[in-house]
Amino acid sequence: MELNGVMLVALLMSLLLIVSHILFSLRNKLSVDNTTINTTMADTRPIPASNKPLKIVVFDLDETLGSFVEIAMFWEALEKYYGYNLVDERFFEVLDTFPDFLRPKILVILDYLKDKKNKKTCDQIMIYTNNQGPKSWVKMISNYLNNKLNYKLFDKIVAAFKVKGKIVEVGRTSHNKSVEDLVRCTKIPINTEICFIDDQKHPLMAQDNVYYINAKPYDFSMPYEEMASLYYDLFSEKYSIEDSKEEFMNNIVTYMNRYKYKLYDKSDEEYNADIVVSKQILIHLEDFFKNGRSQHTRKRRKQRKQMTKKTSLR
């Protein structure tokens, strides 16, 4: 009887220890889970304002840095012709062959920003785009521009919210460009001074800390036959293209015609106007770095006419 009592006490003590261990483990698990949840929530919140606001420049891609639709078509036709994905260096050759698809003087503008970054007066350069291609396409264009400058100019890319119905940029909440989404995606402080350059109007980007340069869209097109002919002349030997020039051109042109893309001729007057727009962009960038977004300059800018009117040179 005495032995049974001792065994019962021992059993109860063992059960008590087991229950205590389970409760302790549950408490630790809940603590870890709460920490994880809090950390995740913190990641979606904007970084608090810094003592000295950052200065950044944000570019749109299409019709702002250049006119890339036809280049994308030609690049896709080339990859289809070769039967495999081509490396970035081959893309660099394509853009070097057809430099008019870049906005005139854009490399001068970017070289100016390179100097500003080197002097620590510009903190970051970004691309904020609604381009419906893969993010790798935008990255390849930014790599090309970096390569031309021999400098890593672009720090971040904010891609489209969705492409073909699938979310691409998880930090964005819609296709509309907004300062809130930009802050969320890039983790910049909320008081960052932003120079935003885009050929479209985005009302949610028109905030007090944004110097908005609404530039005239840059468009350029080139006959498919001319593109295919020039490429063949330059690279048929280098890449051992076995087809005749006629066969190669027919292959490329047939593929590009699938898109039913409308080509047009740009007059010398229009091209000269594009050069003027680029000069104005540079002037406004200089103003941004000189004056920022102070209340005085903001009031003064409201009295100016818009830098360019989209309908003025069409």
Image (tube, rainbow, N blue to C red):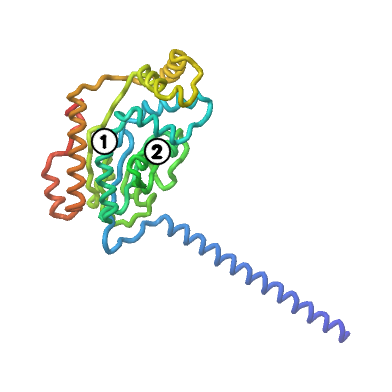
Which of the 4 image quadrants contains residue 226?
A: top left
Q: Amino acid at mark 2?
A: Val
Q: Position of residue 10 (x, y in %)?
A: 79, 80
Which of the 4 image quadrants contains residue 150?
A: top left
Residue shown at 30% from the left, 36% from the top: 65
Residue shown at 29% from the left, 28% from the top: 100
Identify whether 293 is placed above or below 69: below
Circle nearer the N terminus (1, 2): 2
Q: Amino acid at mark 1?
A: Asp
What residue would you read off at disc 1? 199
Question: Depth check: 28 or 269 in front?
Answer: 269
Q: Regarding mark 2 in the picture, which secondary structure is present there?
A: helix
Question: Depth check: 132 or 180 in front?
Answer: 132
Q: Position of residue 156 (x, y in %)?
A: 38, 47
What residue would you read off at disc 2? 138
Q: Position of residue 20 (x, y in %)?
A: 67, 74
> Considering the image in quadrants, where does the C terminus appear?
top left
> Considering the image in quadrants, where does the N terminus appear?
bottom right
- Is residue 55 at all visible to an observer of this figure? no
